[in-house]
Image (tube, grey):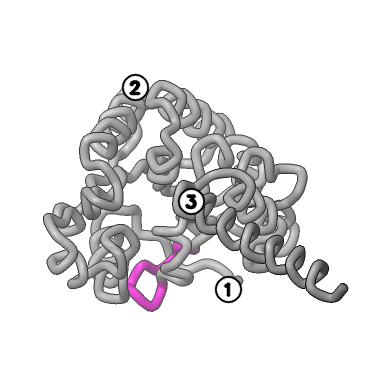
Amino acid sequence: MQKKPFSIALFLVLSSYILGLVTYRNNLFPLNFYRDFGQSNPASAIFQCPTTTDRFGTVLSGLHFHTDFSDLGILVGDSVIEFVYDPRPYGLDGWVDVALSGQTTQCLLSEIGSYTALSPKEAMLYIGGNDIDRSVPMNEICNNYELIVGAFLESGISLALHEIHYGLDDRRSHALVEGVNDCINRIASEHAIQVIETPQGFRYSDLGEATETSIDGEHLNHKGYAIWMRYLSENLPSIEAGPAL
């Protein structure tokens, strides 16, 4: 009598395990959906967007009520920027990080008001890498980018655009990165906006070369951030440090 419940339980456990392996390996529903749903606000989970109300305690939507950003520059983008945490120790004074891991052009556009409401002195935009990873069509990326740039400019915020790092081709297709960067340069040219070229030192031919400045061929390590922030300090406007966050 006891063998039947045990057999059923064993069958359910093994089935769940096999289903988990298959969905994880192939990035399929339901495991991938659950992962995104569990990390995102339920209202935006279907779009797989990082939100400004639940990621690492970041509440960007109301930040402008508590801090004066008028003398600060903001670094806007995805995890490549977010993981620097604070650019000031690397020598980039007057700039703060308001980026979110997993950010895409569509997600950023969906809550662009939270960023423009900060009313910073300057903004630098580094976005598009996750769009490539999610196979977003190039015309959609460019259209979103155009709307994001327009929102910043309409708000009277000075803007600089940064090309996407090429990284390791195994991590992110260099050809697709080139396509996004071409789009960035076209939009910048149309609006007379400064473009910051990606440092060639962040284009890797193999993982061995990448580990010098990167943790995985895409995200940077401390040395990589030290090089990048120093590079930005030479290319971004000099902004006197504003009030502490």
Which callout, 3 or 2, points at the residue further toward the start of the chain? 3
- Which numbered disc covers residue 190? 2
**SS under mark 1:** loop
Q: Do residues under tags 1 and 2 come within 8 Å of each other at their CB atoms?
A: no
Q: Residues within 10 Å of mark 2 (few under 14, many from 20)?
A: few
Q: Nearer the viewer, residue 142 or 211?
A: 211
Magenta range: 88-96
Coordinates of residue 146 in the picture (x, y in percent): 46, 26
Q: Say which residue label 3 marks.
A: 76
**SS under mark 3:** strand
Amino acid beneath label 3: Val
Q: Nearer the viewer, mark 3 or mark 1?
A: 3
In the rendered view, does 10 fall on the left or right side of 144?
right
Residue lying at the far right in this picture: please name it.
1
In the rendered view, does 68 fall on the left or right side of 127?
right
Q: Nearer the viewer, residue 226 or 243?
A: 226
The quarter of the image holding the C terminus is bottom right
- Which residue occupies 80% across, 67% down? 4
In the rendered view, does 234 fall on the left or right side of 153?
left
The verdict on residue 89 being magenta is yes
Q: What distance separates the C-alpha of mark 3 from that of mark 1? A: 18 Å
Q: Nearer the viewer, residue 236 or 75?
A: 75
**SS under mark 2:** helix
Placement of 129 over or under 72, stated as above or below: above
Which callout, 3 or 1, points at the residue further toward the start of the chain? 3
Q: Where on the picture, by quarter, is residue 91?
A: bottom left
Q: Do residues under tags 3 and 2 come within 8 Å of each other at their CB atoms?
A: no
Amino acid beneath label 1: Ala
Q: Say which residue label 1 marks.
A: 244
Q: What distance separates the C-alpha of mark 3 from that of mark 2? A: 21 Å
The quarter of the image holding the N terminus is bottom right
